[in-house]
Amino acid sequence: MGSLRKSIGVAAIAAAMGTAGLVATAPQAAASPAPCSAAARACVALGAKSAWLMNGGVVTYGAVPITSGKPGYRTPKGSFKVTYKDIDHWSSAFNGPMPFSVFFTTTGVAFHEGSLSQLSHGCIHLSRDAARTFFDNLAPGDVVEVVA
């Protein structure tokens, strides 16, 4: 009974607060296993056009849809670490906004809000909500794995 009361209490608090202050969880329909190691805090599957946030090998958010690099600007595969974040980044190379940027390569590749219908110059485009969630939940030093 105590567990049920706690669940109802958390639901009531969440309803009153919206999602502020709570750990984001993916909608049940979008949940799927991530193809990355337990070391990853963020996982990207280029072929599946999906990304996840993880903690200790457990998916905490996602899968969310992504777009990645177009020919000539392919998103690199491998294991990386978040280098820095910039909520209002402006790309001088491509003269455009990159809201909620989380950089994870030394060549400027980042998660950020972007078109889910157009390929990028190597970055991982996310919806506005997903970009904000990735921005809020990743920190410099966190491992990002990008797989085929």
Image (tube, rainbow, N blue to C red):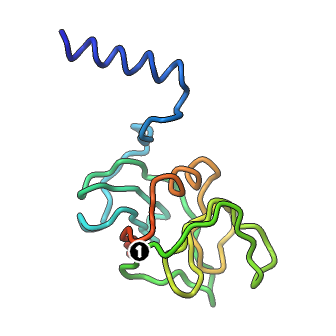
Q: Residues within 10 Å of mark 1 (few under 14, many from 20)?
A: many
The residue drawn where x is 74% and y is 76% is 91
Quarter residue 126 falls in: bottom right
> Which of 123/119 is in front?
123
Q: Left or right? Give the position of 64 relative to 143.
A: right
Whole-percent x and y of residue 41? 35, 62
Is disc 1 placed on a helix, strand or loop?
strand
Can residue 115 be seen in this snapshot?
A: no
Q: Position of residue 105 (x, y in %)?
A: 50, 82
Q: Residue at x 40, y 63 (%)?
A: 42
**Residue at the image position 34 percent from the left and 56 percent from the top:** 54
Q: In terms of depth relative to the viewer, which is nearer, 43 or 142?
A: 142
Which residue is the extreme one toward the left?
A: 1
Whole-percent x and y of residue 141?
39, 71
Image quarter where the N terminus lies is: top left
Q: Quadrant of residue 52?
A: bottom left
Q: Which residue is mark 1?
A: 146
Is 62 or 6 nearer to us in this picture? 6
Q: Quadrant of residue 48?
A: bottom left
Q: Residue at x 34, y 14 (%)?
A: 8
Indicate the amino acid at tag 1: Val
Where residue 148 appears, as percent x and y from the top left, is: 40, 76
Specify the farthest residue to the bottom: 72
Marker count (numbered)? 1
In this rendering, the answer to whether 79 lies above or below 30 is below
Say which of 93 and 136 sits in front. 136
Left or right: residue 12 versus residue 125 is: left
The answer, for residue 130, to whether it is visible in the render is yes
